Image (tube, rainbow, N blue to C red):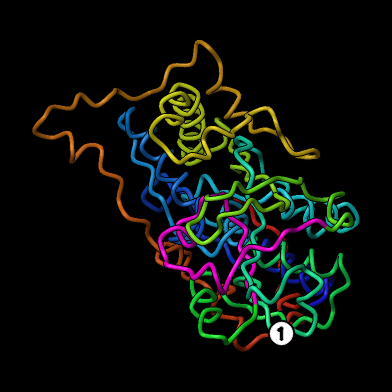
Amino acid sequence: MSAQRIILLILFILTPLCVFGAQAQEFQKNIVTGGAWGTNIQIGRDLASASQGCGQSLNVIESAGSLENLIAVVKQPNIQFGIVQSDVLEYVRNYSINDPDLQRSIDGLRVMFPLYNEEIQVLADRRITRLSDLSGKKVAIGNLDSGTFLTAMLILDILQMNDVTRMEIDPANALPMLMNGEIDAMFYVSGVPTKLFSDIAIDGSKYHLLDILEPELLATYTPVEIAGGTYPFQPEPVSVVAVKAILMTYDYKLGASNYNYKSCRTVSDLASSLLTSLGELKQTGHPKWHDIDLSKVPPGWKVSDCVKIGMASDYERKCQRVETTTANQDESTEIPEPANLSEIRKPVATIDVLKPTKTIQEYLYQLKGRVPK
């Protein structure tokens, strides 16, 4: 799929198809994260735990990844937060400069907080030693709606590796296919350590992570090292590149409507909860909390005004802390398993429904112009 086809897809999926009143639905607080095996969903659960300490209930929702998360924040009511890769944001922003339709679609996107590095991991047969060896090979590049997909496409295009067979397979399904010899390698963009590579037995004598040292990639990606022993199958360190995970939200206006008011307060409350709980998250949450630098806002994007309200030193959360006892502590601190994004989508034609029967050009034909969330 060419870069032009990707951007046509983004133009469609960022454009709402019809109007449904968010105010008419029961108000919920939701964050879309990523797949069940990824780091993003664990970070989402940590955020839900931090907000729950203030008596809030933030639902953690599984998704295909960055592209779907970006769509959900723009289009879906009651989706206030989504984790999106920095290269996905950069890709969309660059194309929107000369594309009014895309610019209108992303007008409401705002930065909540920059989070952590997501390492670009390419797991391959040991006989493959570098990215250039992927020429002529079958390579899983992630779901169509995922950040892994877009990152893999960009990297292969930057390196002009046009003879790679690019297979749209999510990492959880790609790993057994790799171990069965059905594919030769797989891309996975996720903060290390990721559960998929940690919890599933991988034979280190047959498979390894590729070093990513190509200088052409350094203009877009940050060089990092995955320490030896991060995964049981990988005793030696690996030099790779990374993107930044960004927590995104929407440009809610306090006085616009009751829904906007409640959503803005939700954003402000989570901002306050995150700042208050950051030290605790570093001790009890995912290891990636140690790498978070809240000052690394991606260029070209605005921070939400609702976030700034919650960061104020005199901000008071409109909630009361839950007083737990030995009898009810487990119940009050339990984080529910992630729901699936399809369960709470608007009841209209979505990208998942249209993919089997519509071409990218037909997606573009469906454009109706952006409808405010």
* Residue occupying the point 57% across, 36% down: 256
- Frontmost residue, 26 versus 206: 206
Q: Return the residue at label 1.
A: 359
- Frontmost residue, 271 versus 262: 271
Decide if residue 285 is on the left or right side of residue 332: right
Q: Quadrant of residue 115?
A: top right
Question: Percent position (x, y) of residue 184?
Answer: 64, 80
Q: Quadrant of residue 222?
A: top right
* Residue occupying the point 62% across, 67% down: 123
Q: SS class of the residue under badge 1?
A: loop
Q: Quadrant of residue 124?
A: bottom right
* Residue occupying the point 53% across, 40% down: 288
Residue 264 colored magenta?
A: no
The magenta stretch is 185-213
Position of residue 291 relative to residue 29, above or below, is: above
Question: Percent position (x, y) of residue 361?
Answer: 77, 81
Residue 192 colored magenta?
A: yes
Question: Percent position (x, y) of residue 258?
Answer: 46, 38
Question: Percent position (x, y) of residue 51?
Answer: 38, 33
- Frontmost residue, 116 versus 367: 116
- Frontmost residue, 72 versus 349: 72
* Residue occupying the point 63% across, 30% down: 293
Decide if residue 15 is on the left or right side of residue 320: right
